[in-house]
Amino acid sequence: MKSLNRVKRIASRIVKCDKKSISSKVFKTLSGILKGGAALLLSRILRRKSTWLIGETDITAQDNGYHLFKYVRENYPEKECYYLLDRKSPDKEKVEMLGNVVYHGTFKHLLYLFQTEKHIGSHDYRYWHYPGYSKIFSKFFGSFIKGKFIQIQHGIIHIKSERGFHYDPEKPYDVICVSSQYEKVLLRDHFGHSEEVLKITGLCRYDKLENQEVDEKSIIFMPTWRKGLHKKEEFLSSEYYRRIEEFLSDEGFISLLRTQGIKLVLYLHVKLQHHSRYFEKYENDVVRVVGLGEESVQELIKKGNLMITDYSSVSLDFAYLNKPVLFYQWDFSEYVEGYDVQNPKEYQEMRFGYICKTKGELLEHVEEYLLNDFQVNPIHGEKSDLYFEYRDRNNCKRVYEVIEGL
């Protein structure tokens, strides 16, 4: 009966998918179940390996997972540490240079899930590190995947309303790395994590985050993703698309950038990167659209002078370098409702930059920063200082020591 119910659930998921996603997602799910069964049997014969399996999303190697992996490979090459990545990842080559790559969906991947001693992820481990429909795979094999689960985080949680995707009480982590005492208290008192689980380490990627002097100054525009915008028709008819489009095409703004010798770089969230091509028509001598794999987010942040985003936690990376951020929140009411933001007032009060609701407000503050050579407002600087315990180059070292000591 249980098997029949699982089949029914798979079928219901198939109905909701478009044809393109059916072939890949269902195949990966079924393949994962078959390989998983064989891998589970083999893992019972083989002795559990004292390995670390690190990853981010299935296709990226740019975030805290990659930086921790690189640190371990360069400083502790004898450590049985492996990086999980899709074969089609644009970051594949740089990870392969470090060695110890495990490709997503392979038999080795499934075997290591059952054998690994420490599972380490910067994103939701159980979602990104399981093949196909992760919930279905977890139903079959979740109870057999043992070891410690370590969350090294994708970003800093700094407000009560910003409930991270990995704070599900039914999927606990043995360690959650945080960046400050402020964040630790927030996760302990508001989200209910124990004192012992929360470790103040800082984010691994910040070890390589430093201002980079370049000839041309630039504004980095990085809006985050929205639900329901995966398909072309939905995206092109959305306010999200219209707002970005009208900003990129504003002739007065483009003229100002040209006069001041400033570049504008658009980089969409990884979940919407496949829509980047719809903005390429606005590229010119001062506007550039960067696609996935062309340049890392960290490289853009290091070279940028001003960031414009809406709600993205990447704004904290920019603030870490004491650089100004503008928040363009044209859809705030809809956003807080759609993402179940429990305290909208706090959500805005804790922002460490000007909040703009209209294109006019945004352009006004952009011009202000152009004229004062991108100097951070002191009030915004004081707010952002709350979120960083360390501004050194030892985050990877601290994270490594925490994991090694488990």
Image (cartoon, rainbow, N blue to C red):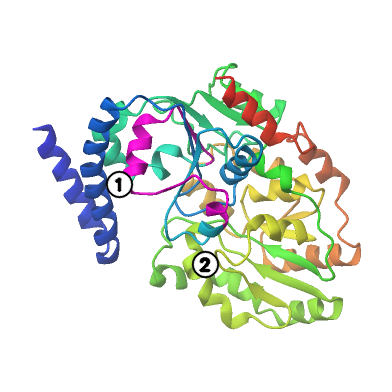
Q: Residue furthest front?
A: 78
Span colored in magenta: 94-122
Is residue 99 rendered magenta in the image?
yes
Q: Nearer the viewer, mark 2 or mark 1?
A: 1
Mark 2 residue element: helix
Which is more N-terminal, label 1 or label 2?
Answer: 1
**Horizontal and vertical percent position of residue 64:** 60, 43
Look at the image and tell me whether residue 365 can be seen.
yes
Above-or-below relation of 249 to 149: below
Rendered residue at 66%/44% (across/down): 205
**Horizontal and vertical percent position of residue 311:** 61, 51
Q: Tell me the amino acid under the disc marked 2.
A: Glu
**Horizontal and vertical percent position of residue 261:** 84, 76
Rendered residue at 27%/63% (across/down): 18
Q: Which residue is mark 1?
A: 133
Look at the image and tell me whether residue 356 can be seen.
no
Is residue 331 rendered magenta in the image?
no
Q: Relative to 383, is 344 on the left or the right?
A: left
Q: Which mark is residue 239?
A: 2
Q: Quadrant of the C terminus?
A: top right
Q: CA distance from mark 2 to mark 1?
A: 30 Å
Above-or-below relation of 224 to 241: above
